[in-house]
Amino acid sequence: MPEQSPIPGEVLDRISIARQPIVNAERLVLAYELFNRSAVASGHSQASDVALALHAVAQSAAPFSTGLHDVFIHSVHNGLAGPQWDFLTPSKTVIEISPAPQHAADFINAQVPALQALKARGFRLAFKHSVIAPVYKPWQSLADFVKINASNTDPSQFKPLVSAARSRTSASLIAEKVENADQFDGMRGLGVEEFQGYWFSIPETVQSNVLTPAQATAIQLFNLVTAEAAIEDVETVLKKDAALGVSLLRIINAAASGMRQKVTSLRQAIMLLGYGRLVRWAAMLLTNTHDHVNVQGTAAVVRGRMMELLAQNSMDSEESGAAFLVGLLSQIDVLLGQPMADLVQQLALDDTVSHALLTGEGKFGAMLALVCACESDDEAAFSAAFSRLPFSLRQINMAHMEALVWADSLAA
């Protein structure tokens, strides 16, 4: 970065960046919204928070987007013409615009040139549903997305809001702040196809489902490699499920790309990779049971990798591996549709891992609370988790971003 950068590097010790998924009705990730989440909410204006977030992304060498998803970034009005947009790829970036102060017509008209300039560069624009009001007519033709707040809106107003948004803009509609099934069903019933909110990042309890053959095989594989069974037994399990075997071989080949000897068979891959790393990939198969990116599966991978990276600051390799498993398996009950207690009994897990998954306590439980807090903009939850652990905000920020990029690279 240039020496005269207006944002000092030490500021990264006071800032952390998170993302929240925007999904479709099947909970497949379509985009992410980035936001700043600091342990101390005061001391930063919204404009400086935007600049700091972009600076952190650029300085970390770990951008949030790998081309798989769009990124939504909020901007205050006086930041619309700022230089921070030079850091981002216009075709993958959506800029969120707040309503005008007091919905003043003069202010709305004054922002049009800056909004048009961003559109001309290839950025897309998102607005709150207040943009459908007549006073915002100058902005309506510029809207690519309109976000309808499902929590702060009376359900009886869902239909007129959706109808007005469609008649006055050509924008795609996103139901945001979705916190329960009624809000989701109400919006989906009106044809809204994109959703955002705690109901997706913190899913409700689901009824138990029968495991698919692939899931049952993945559990068997996990238990075998954890118990250090004979290679012949592990290979036999993989050969019984062609899709699972091919999937694991693909992951192993990617992980072993730095090896001089090319991996050409399951048996050879198992020998080259070793059980210590193989158990992690077997666990990952339990969280990756869909052909597309699933919000819970992605979050589980991010949690595992972030916990591992944080653990490496103060723990040995064995404990770091345990931290990975805690994060990765933290949503296994949602993904497989079974109670966590039942699944823990099926998996050959270390006692510290089982304890963290079942109670959320212990050193791994505290780390899990921290990485879960990074999935939302809940300042109180993050501050509480942050205060319990010895990590700096810089360590948390870098671990989070590296985990996000790592998870995206696996889905590529």
Image (cartoon, rainbow, N blue to C red):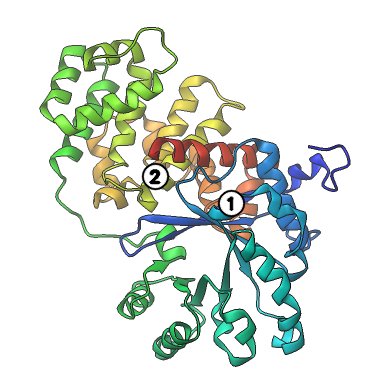
Residue 396 % position (x, y): 63, 40
Residue at mark 1: 18
Give the amino acid at mark 1: Ala
In this rendering, the answer to whether 282 lies above or below 273 is below
Kindly identify which residue carries mark 2.
Answer: 330
Relative height, residue 298 to residue 148 (above, below): above
Q: Is residue 293 visible?
A: yes
SS type, badge 1 = strand
- Camera-nearest label, 1 or 2: 1
Q: Earlier in the sequence, mark 1 or mark 2?
A: 1
Q: CA distance from mark 1 to mark 2?
A: 19 Å
- Percent of width and height locating residue 183: 38, 77
Mark 1 surroundings within 10 Å by alpha-carbon count, few (fewer than 14), some (14 through 19), many (20 or more): many
Q: Amino acid at mark 2?
A: Ser
Task: Identify which residue is drawn at 30% across, 27% down.
Answer: 250
Q: Residue furthest top?
A: 261
Residue 345: quadrant of the picture: top left
The quarter of the image holding the N terminus is top right
Instruction: Residue at the far front: name it.
Output: 120
Tell me which residue sits at (27%, 60%) in the image. 206
**For this rendering, which residue is in front, 286 or 105?**
105
